[in-house]
């Protein structure tokens, strides 16, 4: 196959980020920078129980003694953490949380309307409950009452701290400890909101739970914290989506997600990440430094599906600790990089229990001058009798100026384990495009078709509404990357 | 329908076609035969508009219009179809998705509304039956894991769906067992019509026993050396290229 012409490529890098609008909302900030006073300010602002001050302080002190990681296969200048604000909240919410959707500030509603996430319950897609988070503060959660009847709790984590402090205290930091890594420690110290989900024993959550994250304020980091607890024999499917305004400076997003899948439960977690990726010259864009991890007890299953199209840098390894016997971990990922985006993403599957199984399907697509790295760890501990892993890591290159890298780490300490790894690297060649063209399909449409086909196995794991959205995003992210 | 006059084509500066003349009328079936390297597949690629094939002299008229400046998809929309010698795989894209995209692109070019799913499926099932293809084949990824014979049948199936005016079959018979050859030939014969023309590129007389051509051409070193009726293919089969051309 012949490479695709460079100038043809360049001609097409045209599409602007569609979600880059800025909204003017009166914000309440914490004092600039990070110190113990700011931690206390956040804690006071949020009227949290005393154990949280302790949690935050320990995290802050651990973070203070850590160094910013730069081992990833991406370059960024050291961040000046004292130049950012660690708490920004729309004033109307910060001072008085709306009790119903009607009470939400119309300007905030407009933001979510423009994003296609209406907060009026009657307009919301049937079967999806939404928690909308703007600059670290949850502004509205829909379908709450319907879920409450089944005993399912779906609310902002700040509200959970108020109403269910014991539950939060028991599980917060249990999968991602406060001092797990630099960004997780930072998050533990300053997180202001996020979603909390609790599904009681034996309950199958009948609708998709979804959180939509939006960064709006300038010079603020977004540090949301998500905690999902699935009791024995329960099931929940959770989705998250995210966008940010187009800004020439970088914005930091350091989230932590913890999943607790108790025996026989199943947590399905899907992400469509579309943070602002920066402009064509690589200016601006979100630094997406996220720690996501779940623990699966006996016979439990955790499945991560992610479609990553945004962010200037993505540093993210959704992982599963397969603690219980017969537990299952899955990771399905599509990561697209274009222009100057850098992605270093993958997963960790830690096999501890017997007969534990994990499956990794990673599809990296690189275009422009971007770099796309898969980094994964499959670890089989001595206790993990009969552990099985299958990994498939495919890279697709578009053009001649991008890079694809694969770093699979495998550590097996039990001889009964079977670990398989397959990897391919391919290009969208002229032959396949000519074939499509000959059938009458124009090049851009052909590329979309090929990419969707390439990602089929991952997209098939997304809930239907999300899959449609994800396909559109893939098309837009790569629009014009092939001539 | 197709008029080729004094066509010279170079690939990477190397002349392949050197003064080719060909006239194909609607309703006709032409067979183009010739030894390896004669330029048969180059002609197919040039007609379909593949990049990298430079026309240095001469012209190609399709329905009276010079097509040299048209993109491959525009030629497709105009009614030119190429059944590939080596069809590519498109992993994860089902035949249904692929042909939906192709058909709707053709319809859009004619300012027609896209087909709805029921219409699309009815059409695909009908054409699959023509090629004796199991309907489950429609849900499989385009050419992925297909045997050589299945790929060739899939090409003719696509041709049946898109209903082109000019069908170019580039060595469709190679890699087909006798049963598959018969199925493909039956389908091609069923598609013959007064408004459609065929250009069969082949090495072998075998195909022409099933699809009877109106005209047979022998291409050697980028030029048509001899043309004649179906009996020319018989003669070629008996004598071989060298003997045939030295007696010419």
Image (cartoon, grey):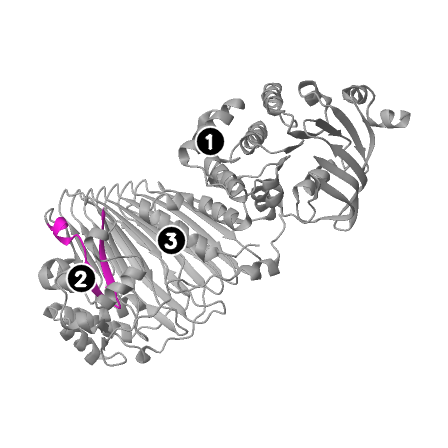
Q: Is residue A422 visible?
A: no
* Other-residue count near label 3 (Cα within 10 Å), few / some / many at <14 / 14–19 / ≥20: many
| A336 sits to left or right of A268 | right
Q: Position of residue A396 (x, y in %)?
A: 50, 51
Dot 2 falls on which chain?
A
Identify which residue is drawn at 55% across, 34% down.
B162
In this picture, residue B156 sits left or right of residue B213? left
- What chain is tagged by disc 1? B
**Mark nearer the N terminus (2 vs 3):** 2
Residue B140 vertical position relative to residue A1 in the rendered view, above or below: above
Where, by quadrant of the figure, is residue B178 drawn? Answer: top right
Q: Which mark is residue A157?
A: 2
Q: Nearer the viewer, residue B238 or A38?
A: B238
Q: Secondary structure at mark 2?
A: helix
Residue B35: give x, y in percent of width and height: 78, 32
Image quadrant in which you'd find residue B193: top right
- Label 3: state its secondary structure: strand
**Distance between mark 1 and mark 2 Cα atoms:** 48 Å
Q: Mark 3 sits on what residue?
A: A307
- The residue drawn where x is 61% and y is 19% is B182
Q: Is residue B199 left or right of residue A120?
A: right
Residue in front for this viewpoint, A394 or B90: B90
Mark 1 Cα shell of 10 Å, populated few (<14), some (14-19), many (≥20): many
Tell me the mark number nearer the camera, choosing from 1 and 3: 1
Q: Which residues are magenta?
A: A127-148
Mark closer to the observer (1, 2): 1
Q: Chain of mark 3?
A: A
């Amino acid at each position: 196959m012949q490479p695709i012409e460079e100038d043809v490529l360049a001609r097409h890098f045209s599409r602007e980020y569609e979600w880059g609008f800025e909204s003017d909302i009166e914000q309440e900030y914490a004092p600039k920078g990070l110190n113990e006073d700011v931690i206390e300010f956040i804690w006071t602002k949020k009227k949290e129980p005393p154990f949280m001050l302790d949690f935050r302080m320990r995290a802050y002190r651990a973070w203070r003694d850590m160094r910013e990681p730069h081992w990833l296969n991406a370059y960024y200048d050291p961040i000046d953490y004292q130049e950012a604000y660690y708490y920004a909240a729309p004033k109307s919410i910060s001072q008085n949380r709306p009790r119903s959707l009607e009470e939400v500030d119309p300007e905030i509603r407009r933001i979510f309307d423009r994003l296609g996430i209406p907060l009026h319950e009657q307009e919301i897609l049937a079967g999806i409950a939404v928690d909308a988070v703007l600059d670290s503060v949850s502004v509205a959660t829909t379908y709450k009452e319907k879920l409450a009847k089944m005993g399912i709790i779906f609310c902002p984590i700040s509200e959970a701290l108020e109403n269910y402090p014991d539950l939060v205290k028991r599980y917060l930091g249990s999968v991602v400890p406060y001092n797990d890594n630099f960004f997780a420690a930072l998050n533990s110290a300053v997180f202001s909101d996020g979603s909390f989900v609790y599904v009681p024993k034996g309950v199958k959550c009948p609708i998709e739970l979804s959180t939509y994250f939006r960064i709006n304020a300038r010079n603020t980091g977004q540090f949301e914290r998500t905690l999902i607890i699935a009791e024995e024999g329960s099931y929940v499917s959770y989705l998250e989506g995210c966008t940010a305004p187009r800004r020439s400076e970088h914005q930091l997003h350091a989230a932590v997600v913890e999943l607790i899948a108790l025996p026989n439960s199943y947590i399905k977690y899907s992400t469509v990440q579309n943070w602002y990726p920066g402009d064509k010259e690589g200016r601006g864009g979100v630094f997406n430094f996220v720690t996501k991890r779940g623990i699966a007890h006996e016979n439990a299953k955790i499945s991560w599906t992610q479609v990553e199209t945004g962010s200037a840098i993505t540093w993210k390894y959704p992982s599963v600790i397969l603690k219980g016997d017969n537990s299952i971990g899955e990771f399905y990922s599509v990561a697209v990089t274009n222009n100057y985006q850098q992605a270093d993403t993958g997963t960790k599957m830690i096999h501890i229990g017997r007969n534990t199984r994990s499956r990794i399907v990673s599809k990296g697509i690189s275009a422009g001058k971007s770099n796309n790295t898969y980094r994964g760890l499959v670890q089989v501990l001595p206790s993990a009798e009969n552990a099985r892993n299958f990994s498939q890591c495919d890279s697709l290159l578009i053009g001649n100026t991008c890079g694809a890298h694969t770093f699979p780490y495998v550590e097996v300490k039990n001889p009964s384990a079977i670990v398989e790894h397959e990897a391919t690297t391919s290009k969208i060649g002229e032959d396949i495009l000519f074939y499509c063209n000959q059938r009458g399909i124009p090049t851009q449409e052909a590329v979309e078709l090929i990419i969707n086909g390439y990602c089929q196995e991952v997209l098939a794991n997304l809930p239907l509404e999300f899959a449609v959205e994800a396909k559109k995003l893939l098309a837009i992210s790569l629009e014009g990357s092939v001539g | 329908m197709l008029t080729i006059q004094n066509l010279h084509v170079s690939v990477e500066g190397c002349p392949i076609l050197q003064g080719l003349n060909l006239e194909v009328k609607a309703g006709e079936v032409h067979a183009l035969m010739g030894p390896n390297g004669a330029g048969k597949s180059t002609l197919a690629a040039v007609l379909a508009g593949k990049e990298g094939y430079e026309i240095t002299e001469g012209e190609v008229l399709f329905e009276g219009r010079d097509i040299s400046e048209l993109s491959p998809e525009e030629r497709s929309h105009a009614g030119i179809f190429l059944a590939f010698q080596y069809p590519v795989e498109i992993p994860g894209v089902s035949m249904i998705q692929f042909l939906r995209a192709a058909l709707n692109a053709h319809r859009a070019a004619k300012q027609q509304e896209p087909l709805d799913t029921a219409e699309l499926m009815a059409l695909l099932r009908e054409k699959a039956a023509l090629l004796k293809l199991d309907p489950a084949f429609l849900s499989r990824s385009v050419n992925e894991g297909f045997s050589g014979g299945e790929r060739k049948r899939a090409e003719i199936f696509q041709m049946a769906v898109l209903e082109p005016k000019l069908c170019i079959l580039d060595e469709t018979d190679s890699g087909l067992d006798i049963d598959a050859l018969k199925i493909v030939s039956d389908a091609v014969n069923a598609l013959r019509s007064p408004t459609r023309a065929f250009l069969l590129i082949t090495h072998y007389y075998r195909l022409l026993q099933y699809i009877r051509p109106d005209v047979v051409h022998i291409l050697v070193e980028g030029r048509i050396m001899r043309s004649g009726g179906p009996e020319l293919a018989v003669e070629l089969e008996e004598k071989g290229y060298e003997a045939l051309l030295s007696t010419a």
